[in-house]
Amino acid sequence: MWPHIHSRVLAALLLFQVTMLGYFGAKKFYYAPLAVPLVIVSLIFAFVCRKKFYPAFRHTALEVVCLELKDTPDMEHIFKSYIPSCLCAENFEDDKLEVALSEV
């Protein structure tokens, strides 16, 4: 998972840097050429990270492979946990309803 996230973050960084280069160039900002090395350094950083860290994620770790598969979670419980209690439609029994109405 890490290589996918890392690649997307670096792609977003490079897109931002190229966009800002274009924006600064369109506005004729005097120091815009100073941003060109940022793109080059970002590309070098991406290349170094891919060569150094990607091989560690190429194969699944034995610890993860040895773990037992989890059972499918109770989806009804998960859905109910995200619904506020004020929105839950509970069926009150007659005696509980009378107590609730008398407290109002």
Image (cartoon, rainbow, N blue to C red):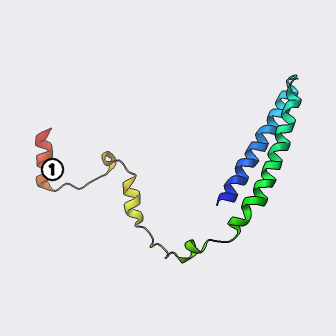
User: Which residue appears at 12% of the width and 40% of the height?
Assistant: 103
User: Which residue appears at 11% of the width and 48% of the height?
Assistant: 98
Instruction: Decide: is 57 above or below 94.
Output: below
Q: Position of residue 30 (x, y in %)?
A: 88, 22
- Helix, strand or loop under label 1: helix
User: Which residue appears at 86% of the width and 38% of the height?
Assistant: 37
Instruction: Decide: is 92 above or below 42.
Output: below
The number of discs equals: 1
Q: Position of residue 58 (x, y in %)?
A: 71, 68
Which residue bears the numbered disc 1?
97
Instruction: Decide: is 30 above or below 88.
Output: above
**92 or 8: nearer the viewer:** 8
**27 or 7: nearer the viewer:** 7
**65 or 93: nearer the viewer:** 65
Q: Position of residue 70 (x, y in %)?
A: 47, 72
Mark 1 Cα-neighbour bin, 10 Å: few <14, some 14–19, many ≥20: few
Q: Residue furthest front?
A: 52
